[in-house]
Amino acid sequence: MKPDDITYFEVDESGTIKCTDFCQFKTRNEAYDLSLDYDVATPVRLVSAAEDCFPLQWLIAGQYTEYRENPAYPARLKSMPEGPEYGWIDWVLGADDETFSSLRDLIKKWLSEEPDWFGEDEYIHYTKWSDGAAYNFFEGEEQDKLDTIGVDLIDGPYPGNDYRGAKLRLSIEEANVIAKAKGLSYRFRKKNEE
């Protein structure tokens, strides 16, 4: 096997395996795979996208509350449900062109921003993270190969933890000797600490 044909995975001190040179997302658009031209193009599509993306739903619910409580329009308080969890869908579906356009502009800005790492991280699909991508790779391997090279899959979700990743039980050197002997197309190396 040629050196160029080998995929390398980084392993940190705790044995967590990560994809090397993983291009992590920088914006919510990349993190949630939402398209302004499709997912946010119409009220029906926006509702569908927001039902699958809680952080987007929170943004819309916040806008719904602001719209409902605008002091210039006191009648809205009586005609629109108080709780945004009940009212935002009807509000989006019934929005006039100007209101929907304004909402789309806000969402466009929101999608271009970096996610809130402490509030949104659990809603981003695991394959968008380098350790989740490593899990995704090793999940496709036969269990006997994983056992031989000492890779354990940590498969959430379960209450309190939805982490998905892979851990190396053996030393990096030992796993690489086995991987080479078995003709596997990947190897491990120590994670470069920054």
Image: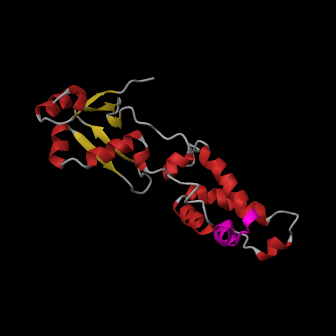
Q: Quadrant of the C terminus?
A: top left
Q: Judge by depth and name the residue closer to the eye, 18 or 98.
A: 98
Classify residue 84 as left or right of residue 66.
left
Q: Residue at x 15, y 46 (%)?
A: 144
Q: In the rendered view, would you say 98 is above or below 130?
A: below
Question: Magenta includes 93?
Answer: yes
Percent of width and height locating residue 84:
68, 66
What is the x, y in percent for residue 38?
Answer: 55, 59
Residue 175 picture location, percent across and down: 20, 32
> Is residue 121 visible in the rendered structure shown here?
no
Q: Does residue 128 appear left or right of residue 46 in this picture?
A: left
Q: Position of residue 129 (x, y in %)?
A: 43, 42
User: Chief secondary structure of the magenta span?
Assistant: helix
Residue at image point 25% right, 49% down: 140
In the depicted structure, whether residue 77 falls above or below residue 164: below
Q: Residue placed at 32% from the left, 31% from the top? A: 11
Colour style of the rendered protein structure: secondary structure
Q: Depth check: 96 or 129 in front?
A: 96
Which region of the structure is painted magenta?
84-98
User: Is residue 147 part of the magenta span, yes or no?
Assistant: no
